[in-house]
Image (cartoon, grey):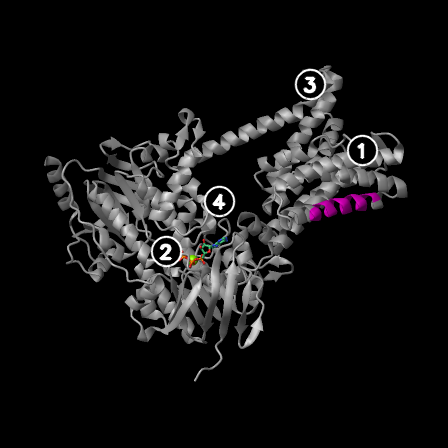
Amino acid sequence: MRALFETIVQMEFIMTAIELSVPLVLAALAALITNKAGILNIGIEGSMLMGALMGAVVGYQTGSVMLGLLAAIAIGAFLGLLMSVFVNKFKINHILVGIAFNLLAAGLAIFIIYVRTGTKGDHPSVSIPTWTVPYLSDLPIVGPLLFGQNLMVYLTVVAAVVIAVVLSRTKLGMHIKAVGENVEAAESVGINAFKIQSYALLIGGVLAGLGGAFMSMAYMSTFNTGMIAGRGFIGIAAESMGAGIVGNTVLASAVFGFVNTFAVTAQVTLRIPFELLNTLPYLVTILALVIYAMRKRRKQVKQP
Amino acid sequence: METTPLLDMQAITKIYDNGVVANDNASFSLRKGEIHAIAGENGAGKTTLMKVLYGLEKVDEGRVMLHGNEVNITSPHKAIEHGIGMVHQHFMLVDSLSVAENVMLGAEVTKRGFIDKSHGIQKTEAIAKTYGLYINPLAKTQTLSVGLKQRLEIIKVLARDVSIVILDEPTAVLTPQETVELFNQLKRLRNEGHSIVIITHKLKEIKTICDRVTVMRHGKTIGTYDVATITEAEISKRMIGAEVRVERVERSIQGGKPILEITNLTRHHPGEPSLHDVNLSIRPGEIIGVAGVEGNGQRTLIDILTGYASSYEGRVLINGVDIRGRSIKAVRELAVSHIPEDRMIKGSNPFGTIGENLVSTTINKPAFNRAKGWLINGRKIRQYTQRLLKSYRIKADNTDVPVRVLSGGNIQKVVCARELDSQPSLLIADQPSRGIDVGSMEFIHRQIETLASNGSAVLLVSADLREIFRLADTIYVIYNGAFVGAFNNDGSVREDTLGEYMLGIKRQAFAKEVARRDAGNAAL
Ligand SMILES: Nc1ncnc2c1ncn2[C@@H]1O[C@H](COP(=O)(O)OP(=O)(O)OP(=O)(O)O)[C@@H](O)[C@H]1O
Ligand SMILES: [Mg+2]
């Protein structure tokens, strides 16, 4: 027990927890913005996988981190727009489109890896650098925490703030909320629901693509077809726990990131079977959703 | 001398995806500065014709001329650009937004990329002031009463600087006082050069405020008439093809124990009109009408009686059973029917089919089940649906369509049919004939009378005083959460007398009297 406690308070543990929260936060933000526009985007998982793949492939091929990141963003945006067309123009149920996208992404990833490497699992990648501020990052505790993180960590923080501001203060955010809550009302005042949902899915796709790129270009510097491992779905769960509020959603994602890190670390310290520990994030998801549902119910009962 | 009309819709045909011909070669023209009514039975195609004009529905044939030029209005956005605004039959509001945010939605003014919230508030206040449409710009839309929501819809249209204003049954949800106010505002708009189209089932309103009326029947426009030269009876004859006969059902109040007994009912809940010490009893065969200005506690009373509001002081007995702590379903199990005020929120599931909606409160009846209640008997439900469609004259050519594609009045008929056909012992009817055409209204009224003549008790709440005069044995006036007057509906009470009580100018010291009367009844 003591050993466990000591691992948790260690700096290294906290840094890893922050890193592992990044893809979850990005996925949750993607879920949040599309949800606000009235689309439950199950396809985030697939978009993340494609983002991770494109980031690795283009990054490795060109040797440029920047181009890799741009490729991940582009594929995410493209998938988001494609989803909007399927949902709005072909009138296919958004859940079905999401499932189809996920299956397609999983298959396509294996295919592309096989064509390029002849194996079905891995593809080399490049690394997004860590941003260290000279001197400041040498400070104890706050140094690495505030001034020594991977670039993507800062980018994620910026993304969360931008999403919050867009939703609460801009015309686009207002229209996204209106379309999500009452399409007919929004359209009756001249808002183009297709356009608005396309924007939301595009932004969501970019976020998901970035989340994927983080996995293959920062957390690890290699791509693996199983590396997203349900993080898209955990992001969706975190969003629903955060009840559509940006701050709460980021917090919920961080809790999942923490538990995930614990599972990874405890393998070493506790000698609990790896498979069992790997279920931990999912168990916590279920537990959290149950608590959330119970609280919501109690609140409803209280209202006379 | 016929000048070019401001707007001319020529030979409009609109066929919905499911094959319904909603507009069949219909024509409509509007002059500048007039108030023009559209009248017609439920499902005649009035709303559809205006949705075509507003760009919400695509037209199949025909053309629209504006200022003598053909225009192609393919979206509400274009309609607004052409200076056309519409207040819809069912509210088009985003509930979680504030009043000002709804007013500006789609037309937000931004400052350095951010929405200028104070501009929206100022604009709302400015319109409120100019037209006497007072409303709190910061209020959350979902907390507004229907009257205020309607007002918000009108402000929304005015905020867009339109010259043609379409109002689809705006007075259906308004009290007589609010209607008078609305009409004053419409006259003012007309004098400022706006042209107004108003769809209504209330023929008296056409006579009061409109210049011309266009009558529609079965998707066709029958004709356009100068209001000055046509009588109410002639309008309704052209609408229906026959005259509406008012037939009263003979009935009498029966003795015996009251079905509904309310004693000292009180409820105070923040953000909601209160109720103070209300006493009421309804005997078998009796219809009690409650008249009052919206927001004086009538909804609170109904919420308690139907199980929606569970915290209150006092006692409610239905057939001798105390309903305290009972759920909505458990209250209904005491043979209580409830026609709610809002057909789209509490009254129906707009996405469910007509059949599903009709059996939603009776699905557990053995007649609709098979295999000891494990399976649903689809055939029986379809037969039942067909029967109700026919007897209530609900216009739908297919029972499997979702209720939301029906016309407004037909949705209301679905709700009425479900609640009236279950043979309740107590009927709580909140604006039962809202949005229903004159012919069908007569039918619904007869249905309610028949129910009472068979020994049911009826509590009728209505903003339409004529409906109350038509049905009630006793009229109670509610003001500020308390009954301030009780009148025998024997033809001696006048509308303006009730009005004085409704506005709180007068009140009877009658609470004790009623208590005495009830005590007397109980002793019988
Ligand atoms: N979206 C839709 N899809 C299919 N049919 C529709 C749709 N909207 C309306 N209809 C049908 O078109 C016909 C005309 O409907 P409309 O709403 O124009 O009638 P209305 O004259 O406004 O009636 P009310 O007085 O009851 O409001 C009705 O038979 C209705 O069922
Ligand atoms: Mg209509």
For numbered disc 4, what is the local secondary structure? loop
Q: Which mark is residue A276?
A: 3
| Residue B293 is at least partly visible in this image | no
Q: How far apart are labels 4 and 2 at the CA level?
A: 20 Å
Q: Amino acid at mark 4?
A: Phe
Residue B351 badge:
4
Q: Is mark 2 within 8 Å of ligand 1?
A: yes
Q: Are marks 3 and 4 on the same chain?
A: no
Chain for numbered disc 1: A
Contact, CB < 8 Å: mark 2 with mark 3? no
Q: Chain of mark 3?
A: A
Q: Residue at x 30, y 32 (%)?
A: B324
Q: Quadrant of residue B200?
A: bottom left
Marks 4 and 1, Cα distance to the nearest angstrom?
42 Å
Residue B286's tag is none
Q: Which mark is residue B435?
A: 2
- In front: label 3 or label 1: 1
List x then y, in percent, for residue B293. Answer: 30, 55
Please give the residue where the numbered disc 1 appears in the rendered image. A110
Q: Are marks 3 and 1 on the same chain?
A: yes
In this rendering, the label closer to the viewer, 2 or 3: 2
* Kind of residue at disc 3: Leu
Ligand 1 rendered quadrant = bottom left
